[in-house]
Image (cartoon, coloured by chain):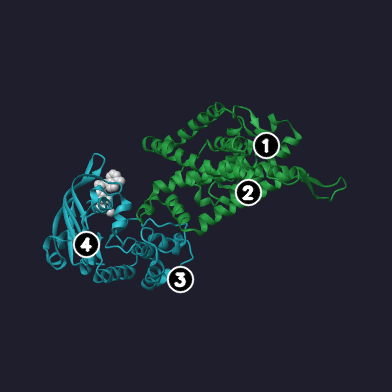
Chain colours: A cyan, B green
């Protein structure tokens, strides 16, 4: 797939001497919702960290985002380019208000559109509007996930990467989060969602990659993967969301 | 009594500013800057140079010392603390601040015009003394006008810090970077710059404190480390994590010190002030204003 927004080729990366990713190829185009599935420890979070350029040491391969070479970028630059991540643990500013968290999401752009963007985040996530003056740490898990996504949206991302957004959330909140992700993709944003819950994710994704031991074991459209006997056997198991 | 209280609050103002600087730098670097008091001494000496060599009045000397403190703080973070952190982590940064104590202590004595003696700083104007209260028969308390300036300038600094950290976008970005560096990087904040600005603000505050107290206590000399410790005690008493606590703690330590010194020799009074630190750590480690849940980090 050429002309994708994000192109990862032969990516090898890890922590110090530990090699976690052993040659990963992956593409995401504008308006696509792509899932990365795989068991715990497969290297899914490592992949997102490598793209966002923090904690992970790159050892080979290329990451091109919107024409820019991310292997030479730092995290701030990836954000400036429009490549945003909502990481594991959400990394909110707990001692700042909900609204301040959102405003700081626009750190790389600001000027002019901040108030408009703030209003549209509140429209998308009404509970945040009610809690705008509260400290972020007082929010429920679902609200924190909304705030983390809202904060990333304040940067007007071209690509939004979510690391296990369903963790610790009630099923109907998870449905809501995926519905919003699908809506964002329809609006032209590229979505890359890491999940362990394969069945749930494949219902919303267009395509998916299955990561195992730091390499892509399977890739295809969501429909293909849902029919794939290996996927059924290994990842769907008895777990339906 | 009132006289002692006012004297205590005056020196307490300096301890409060040292404690606040320690608090701001700790928040950004997770490390206690043991050179905070030395920077305060150097700040006072820079004000002295502004006044004597450049013939600046007390206000320009204060502005010059504060600005110089800010620049010194930037240099300190970028040239000393950051490399120390890269190789030695938080322990490395702590040791670097202790190293800075000695460099500043022995270094400032070599500067022509500074030496190892104490010097008077010009005052901020007004009459020397005024009587503010005459409740008692003996004519009430005589207050040095310079004490009133110290209170006014302390309040001005606190107001400026409050507005910066609570009301401005950049102030909040710096708080965000201090609270959650990864979260800050993920919204595009340059965490290294934010940390350098925090350290610079902390050092500017030390220089400011050393200058506003200068007309009363003299500037220069070897009192820097004792200042650090009293500021640190103040921060522990009030709560290291709480800016309000740092100020209150400064007043508590200042008043305690003055009262103890009025009753016994310095040699006994100072250890007693320090032992408050141990007492606080045992009884209420989060400080008077701290919350228990933030002690662990
Ligand atoms: N910060 C780290 N330092 C060292 N090893 C790590 C670190 N984070 C993850 N790992 C290791 O990298 C491998 C992949 O982890 P991760 O990317 O978090 O997997 P996943 O997100 O798919 O569960 C695991 O073996 C894990 O132990
Ligand atoms: Mg993970």
Looking at the rendered structure, whether the residues under marks 1 and 4 are on a common chain is answered as: no
Q: Position of residue B43 (x, y in %)?
A: 57, 38
Q: Is residue B277 left or right of residue A168?
A: right
Instruction: Kindly indicate whether the residue at mark 4 contacts the one at mark 1 (C-beta within 8 angstroms).
Output: no
Q: Position of residue B91 (x, y in %)?
A: 43, 36
What is the distance, in whole Å, between disc 3 and disc 1 at their CAs? 52 Å
Instruction: Kindly indicate whether the residue at mark 1 contacts the one at mark 3 (C-beta within 8 angstroms).
Output: no
Instruction: Kindly indicate whether the residue at mark 2 contacts the one at mark 4 (C-beta within 8 angstroms).
Output: no
Label 4 Cα crowd, 10 Å radius (few <14 / some 14-19 / many 20+) = many
What is the distance, in whole Å, between disc 1 and disc 4 at their CAs? 67 Å
Asked whether the viewer can see residue B206, the reply is: no
Instruction: Kindly indicate whether the residue at mark 3 contacts the one at mark 4 (C-beta within 8 angstroms).
Output: no
What is the distance, in whole Å, between disc 2 and disc 1 at their CAs? 16 Å
The residue pinned by badge 4 equals: A35
What is the distance, in whole Å, between disc 4 and disc 2 at their CAs? 56 Å
Q: Nearer the viewer, residue B202 or B111?
A: B111
The residue pinned by badge 1 equals: B217
Q: In percent of the image, x 39 and y 58: which residue is there?
A: A107
Q: For the residue with label 2, is its CB less than 8 Å from the closest atom of ligand 1?
A: no
Q: Quadrant of the N terminus of chain B?
A: top right
Q: Is residue A88 left or right of residue B289?
A: left
Q: Position of residue B223 (x, y in %)?
A: 61, 32
Could you tell me which chain the residue with mark 4 belongs to?
A
The residue pinned by badge 2 equals: B154
Closer to the eye: label 1 or 4:
1
Q: Could you tell me which secondary element the residue under label 1 belongs to?
A: helix
Q: Could you tell me which secondary element the residue under label 4 belongs to?
A: strand
Looking at the rendered structure, whether the residues under marks 4 and 3 are on a common chain is answered as: yes
The residue pinned by badge 3 equals: A130
Label 2 Cα crowd, 10 Å radius (few <14 / some 14-19 / many 20+) = many
Question: Above or below — where is B200 with respect to A99?
Answer: above
């Amino acid at each position: 797939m050429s002309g994708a927004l994000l192109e990862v080729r032969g990516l090898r990366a890890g922590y110090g001497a530990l090699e976690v990713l052993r040659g990963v190829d992956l593409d995401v185009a504008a308006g696509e919702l792509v899932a990365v599935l795989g068991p715990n420890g497969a290297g899914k979070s490592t992949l997102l960290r490598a793209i966002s350029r923090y904690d992970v040491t790159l050892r080979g391969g290329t990451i091109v985002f919107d024409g820019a070479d991310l292997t030479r970028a730092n995290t701030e630059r990836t954000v400036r380019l429009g490549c945003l991540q909502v990481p594991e643990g959400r990394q909110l500013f707990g001692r700042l208000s909900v609204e301040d968290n959102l405003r700081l999401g626009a750190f790389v752009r600001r000027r002019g559109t901040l108030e408009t963007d703030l209003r549209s985040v509140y429209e998308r996530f009404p509970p945040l509007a009610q809690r705008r003056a509260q400290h972020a740490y007082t929010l429920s898990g679902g609200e924190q996930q909304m705030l983390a996504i809202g904060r990333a949206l304040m940067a007007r991302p071209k690509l939004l990467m979510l690391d296990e957004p369903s963790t610790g959330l009630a099923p109907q909140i998870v449905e809501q989060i995926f519905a919003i992700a699908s809506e964002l993709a329809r609006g032209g944003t590229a979505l890359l969602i890491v999940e362990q819950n394969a069945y749930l994710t494949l219902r919303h994704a267009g395509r998916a990659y299955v990561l195992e031991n730091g390499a892509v074991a399977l890739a295809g459209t969501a429909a293909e993967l849902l029919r794939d006997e290996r996927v059924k056997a290994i990842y769907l198991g008895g777990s339906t969301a | 009594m009132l006289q002692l209280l006012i004297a205590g609050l005056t020196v307490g103002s300096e301890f409060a500013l040292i404690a606040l600087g320690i608090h701001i730098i700790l928040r950004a670097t997770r490390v206690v800057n043991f050179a905070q008091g030395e920077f305060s001494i150097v700040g006072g000496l820079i004000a002295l140079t502004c006044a004597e060599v450049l013939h600046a009045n007390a206000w320009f000397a204060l502005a010059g010392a504060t600005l110089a403190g800010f620049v010194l703080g930037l240099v300190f973070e970028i040239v000393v603390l950051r490399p120390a952190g890269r190789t030695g982590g938080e322990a490395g940064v702590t040791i670097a601040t202790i190293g800075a104590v000695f460099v500043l202590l022995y270094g400032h004595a070599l500067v022509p015009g500074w030496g190892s003696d104490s010097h008077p700083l010009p005052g901020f104007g007004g009459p020397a003394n005024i009587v503010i209260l005459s409740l008692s028969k003996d004519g009430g308390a005589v207050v040095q006008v310079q004490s009133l300036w110290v209170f006014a300038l302390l309040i001005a600094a606190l107001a400026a810090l409050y507005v910066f950290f609570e009301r401005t976008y950049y102030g909040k970005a710096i708080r965000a970077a201090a609270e959650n560096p990864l979260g800050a990087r993920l919204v595009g904040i340059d965490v290294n710059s934010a940390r350098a600005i925090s350290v610079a603000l902390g050092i500017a505050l030390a220089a400011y404190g050393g200058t506003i107290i200068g007309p009363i206590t003299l500037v220069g000399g070897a009192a820097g480390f004792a200042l650090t410790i009293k500021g640190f005690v103040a921060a522990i008493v009030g709560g290291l994590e709480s800016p309000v606590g740092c100020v209150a703690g400064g007043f508590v330590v200042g008043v305690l010190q003055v009262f103890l010194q009025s009753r016994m020799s310095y040699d006994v009074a100072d250890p007693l002030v320090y032992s408050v630190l141990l007492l606080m750590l045992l009884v209420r480690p989060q400080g008077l204003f701290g919350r228990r849940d933030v002690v662990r980090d």
